[in-house]
Image (tube, rainbow, N blue to C red):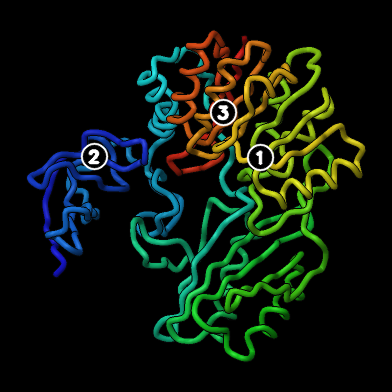
Amino acid sequence: MAEHLFGSCKIDQLTTEGVGKGTSTHGDIYVPFVLPGETVEYERFMKHPNSKREKPKFFLKEISHPNNSRKTPVCKHFTQCGGCLLQHLNDAHYSDFKRSLVSTPFIKHQLDTNCIEPVKVLPAGERRRANFEAVKKKEQVFLGFHRWRSHQVIDLSECHTVHPSIEATFKPLREIFWAAMHEYQKATVYLTLTTVGLDVSIDIHRNELLPNGHELLENYARSSGLARLMLRENRKRITLYKKEQPYVVFDNVKVPVEPSSFLQASDRADEVLTKLVMDALPPKPYKIADLFCGRGTFTFPLSRSAPVDGYECDKQALNVLQEVSDKELRSIQTFKRNLFDSPLTVQELSAYDVVMIDPPRAGALAQIKELSKATNISTIIYVSCGPESFARDGKILTDAGYTLEKVTPVDQFTWAPHLELVGVFKR
């Protein structure tokens, strides 16, 4: 039987996850959408109160004593939708919080915080990718993100983080799902804004759509000018409509993408990050290793300065990168490699003087250990979406003799407790 308990406490701080932490009679509590210094009323929920594994969930009920620096959120769904956690921070608090995402792990790992550059804040409303959930329930379709730490789908009428082209899909998709889905049927919608329009992929959970579903979706794709619309039912994916192959542009090169392709949050993020990477290059590199290269976000611009070897475990991404680079006569060679299990060794790294690395949030501990021993590498450019793993890996490199010259935080995740970093290590 579920347990509901209610309490009140003062919020002491914001965690790196962007939620408020306080101490009460129920122990440490973690509540979203609050600020330090505020007194809040909360609900503590446990589905299985006697379970030793389950952690309690805390939900904000009321702010009895608000912080005077609280800002009015821009979105009417804020505190309901779990997509944003920081819209209530004023500009000063927001800037301090984003910087703390870098400085806190730097202090923990004994790295010099003086090398941290000011945060580059990118505009909201430009994100080119989003994954939404949809469910038809009681003759209504709910389409949007989940409520914070919940499976409940919040029905969105607006979203201030995504590009307007993505926001414009809410109403027509909701209408189609209402006519085409079974009661209590669910779907996941993957949207990517490409250079030639929206690429939409829909995964249907449990059974197929109603008989008219395919026709409704195909008509919508054609009338809305989508680049492509794909549908997955019963574990089979089909293309319902395709105007042309969706692609994005890296360094003036057209690179085809798929719904699962990794991309930075926006075109502007590509531009800002690429400039930081290119500015970090030494004057005349002779050969560059691009680790976790994906489809070539940085590989293509780097190839203008020196031959580049790209390493990645995603075979499809590598095939696209190699095919396009051959067509464009770029000096790029690709290699399928799981850099977590099989990092480039010191001997293999001897072929390069510059290494570009852009790992997932967990970092690249095994590869960093090999890089720390490679005395021939003059420059390591480390792009990271995980400040904690970046600081951990950075400590290994600096202990091995590298100097972290600077790290530039790029806020491409507006109102979310995330940050992209570009760090420059020199031997």
Name the residue nearer the viewer: 223 or 402.
Answer: 402
Q: Nearer the viewer, mark 2 or mark 1?
A: 1
Residue 10 or residue 300, whichever sits in front = 300
Residue 169 visible in the displayed image: yes
Furthest toward the front, the residue is: 347
Name which residue lies at 63% across and 43% down.
Answer: 264
Closer to the chain start, of discs 2 and 3, is 2
As drawn, the label of residue 21 is: 2
Which residue is located at x 55 percent, y 80 percent? 177
In space, the residues marked 3 and 1 are separated at their CA atoms by 12 Å
Q: Give above or below for 374 relative to 139.
A: above
Q: Position of residue 146 (x, y in %)?
A: 41, 61
Q: Quadrant of residue 338?
A: top right
Q: Residue at x 48, y 34 (%)?
A: 386
- Image coordinates for residue 279, horizontal then vertical, percent: 71, 20
Q: Amino acid at mark 2?
A: Lys
- In this view, the residue farthest toward the left is 25
On screen, residue 158 versus residue 314, left or right, reads left
Secondary structure of the residue carrying numbered label 2 = strand
Of 100 and 61, which appears nearest the observer? Answer: 100
Residue pictured at 40% horizontal, 36% vertical:
90
Per the rendering, the mark at residue 367 is: 3
How far from the left and from the top, in percent, is residue 191? 62, 61
